[in-house]
Amino acid sequence: MIAHADNIPSGRHPLVKFILRWLLTTNHKEIGTLYLSFSFLLFFIGGAFALTFRAELAQPGLQFMGADFYNQMVTLHGLVMVFGAVMPAFVGLANYMIPLQIGASDMALPRLNNFSFWIMPFAFGLLLSSLFMPGGAPDFGWTLYAPLSTTYGPPSTDFLILGGQLMGISSILGAINIIVTIFNLRAPGMTLMKMPMFVWTWLITAFLLIMAMPVLAGVVTMMLTDRHFGTSFFEASGGGDPLIFQHVFWFFGHPEVYIMILPGFGIASQIIPTFARKPLFGYASMVYATAAIAGLSFVVWGHHMFATGMPLATELWFMYATMLIAVPTGVKVFNWVATMWDGSMTFETPMLFALGFVVMFTIGGFSGLMLAVAPVDFQYHDTFFVVAHIHYVLYPGAIFATMAAVYYWIPKWTGNMYDERLGKIHFWTAVVALNLTFFPMHFVGLGGMPRRIADYALPFTGLNTFATAGAFLLGVTQVLFLYIIIKTVRGGPKATDQVWEGAEGLEWTLPSPLPLHTFETPPKVD
Amino acid sequence: MSQESLHAGDGPPDYYVPHSSAWPIIGSTALFVTAFGAGHFIQQSTDKVPTATGSYGLWIFLIGLAAVAYMMYGWFAQVVKESIQGLVSAKLDRSFRQSMFWFIVSEIMFFAAFFGALFHARVITVPWLAGASDNLQTHLLLWPDFADTWPLFLTPGGGLTQAMAAWGLPFINTVILVTSSITVTLAHWALKKNNRGALKAWLGFTVLLGAVFLVLQVVEYYEAYHALNLTMASGIYGSTFFMLTGFHGLHVTLGTIMLAVMLIRSMRGHFTPDDHFAFEAASWYWHFVDVVWLFLFTFVYWF
């Protein structure tokens, strides 16, 4: 990043200037950098929580912690990874790349952008402070099911609720900013159907955020009033119902899952054409498929609740609607494969991560189809099979997509090429480690091992030991990722403006490294 | 604060990009103090949980709220100043309009969460507790005397309450809000015809109607608590009633404040017949609050 002196009044101590610059900035590249750094920090915190409970699961019995602390770690791992690592990483990429990709000079509402970011550290301060409160951190899983979170939740649950509301404000304001930027700030000639896929997927994601996050705010508010003000939303003796919690939560929760994957689809759709040296196959169908997935995401939430009590007709509806999602998702996978067909492919690190994304996300998609079948879901429900599924869509899905994006665009951001050899080592160890970690979970889950329990039956020992070894290896590979990034920021072979031979799009017409202000005069798009 | 124009020359810049601003970080700090104080206050006042701040949660909460108000005043004043300086181009104006639209969409979804809870309770939960669908055995085992009624006068746990009648105060409030939606539109027409007197009169009348609505809601709540034994704690009927009407009342309060600010700005000579987005945004918000009320009146009070 280039220091921009006119940001801050001169004549102050350099450290004060540095702090003020990052606190007060309205520049989309700086705010994008803040988002990405913040999400990387929380990625390590969430990972540390995961390694803590994986250590406990290495052997049956309780070795390192009590069941209650185990539950706290599981809960915080989920919350931190979903809201602190994956979402801010994608928002950071959106901030950084969308103005560059549509030829805008900045986000539509730059000050609001700063506001959205700086709410996040405070929100996570509130959430993580719960670890140090009497009664410990929340211990009921990231889904916050009532009555575990209402009648039985520890006092710190209130701070989880308030932190969650702050995160909601941040996400909604951020999403409004992104949607308005895309609708209003495109360069002349950049029609909607010429926009890069990353921009398209983020447009739809922002819409999902605006529709879903307020519902989360609503449901945690009902938790708060049930806990303290005597309401009985989730209390049967007052005529309420824990199922109301589940319905409202998953009405948010399912779109949330797509919020965490659609930008990843966009990233894969940018990277694969670049390294296949062919235009994206079926651009229009990609756009419509993304919109179809987003639309369906609002009518399938009940598949999270097959085993908890719904009328038969409702179960059937949610089952068929869920299976229908496989159609647009299949269109996307088909298009990625067809893009590569007959291409002159090379396999630089971003392409490797994008391919890992396509292959392993598809594994997660298939296990999702299995879970969508209501009668068999009664068997899988609340087992490690669900854990395997969600981690196959999120780790090689959302996280690999983010890493692919970082490798893809970091030469543009810093002006330096990353270390290709280290990048490849990072990819291959991550692939081995993550399959070692998450693949055995399919088997123990089908074998009947329940999730969110600190202990397990002896026959599951071997596979769990493998999973724990994989998890620690996976943790180490991400330290390597941090090292690669720092090394690239500090120096390296100079990147050209186009960076990749096959790269197309407005961002590649700009110099590497990027100046602080770009497209002050909008480019013309033919 | 320095400014940057994307196209140098006469007239407003193509798109005004402020270089840096302290208001956002003041705002996020203020939100944090508010949330931190609210958490401590709630625990201290309802659970008597000893927390790190002794009994000062309420004060921290109020300081946070005051800081949020200060931030909003300062930030909006800054934007108003920029607008008066002529920095707002047609394109930036479109950004403001679109973001207000999406903000209202998010507000609609916030209410949708509570309406969802209400519909689930009425259509599924209460009948199921009374044995509908395949729940007869649960019904007989847990609360065999429980009957399916709405409003739910008698909860499974034995709580008794009475319903709030739709055609008393709530109906008067409906008339007030619908009228206020008309008067704010009349104010808008007056503004477009540059009839400043009528603008101030109709806008003032709208603010007054908003205030009367709020006073009547306080009366209604008083009656609910003291005459009908209808409280937040009286089962799912009371829960949904107070959650929906309470959050709606909060939004009416915010809308009234917005319109009052527009009234003050009109008196100071702000707004022109073709440039008055702040007024429009406040009136959109007011119409949104009005429409939510119509749903409330229909599903919370009437049916």
Image (cartoon, rainbow, N blue to C red):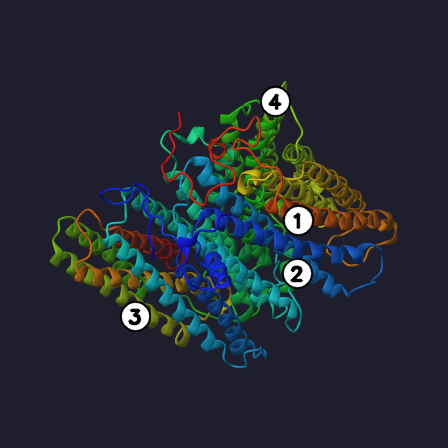
Callout 2 amino acid: Phe
Q: Secondary structure at mark 4?
A: helix
Mark toward the viewer: 2 or 1: 1
Callout 4 amino acid: Ala
Task: Quadrant for residue A263, please give it.
Answer: top right
Q: Is residue B14 visible?
A: yes
Q: Secondary structure at mark 3?
A: helix
- Image marks 4 and 1: residues in contact by CB distance under 8 Å: no
Q: CA distance from mark 2 to mark 4?
A: 44 Å
The circle on residue A140 is 2
Question: A312 and B140: which one is in front?
Answer: A312
The circle on residue A482 is 1
The residue carrying mark 4 is A338
Q: CA distance from mark 1 to mark 3?
A: 58 Å
User: Which badge, 4 or 1, comes first in the chain's sequence?
Assistant: 4
Residue at the far top in the pictured view = A342
Question: B159 and A30: which one is in front?
Answer: A30
Relative image position of residue A191 (x, y in whole percent): 39, 30
Mark toward the viewer: 4 or 1: 1
User: Which badge, 2 or 1, comes first in the chain's sequence?
Assistant: 2
Near mark 2 (Cα within 10 A), the count class, few <14, some 14-19 or many ≥20, is many
**Quick check: A230 above or below B7?**
below
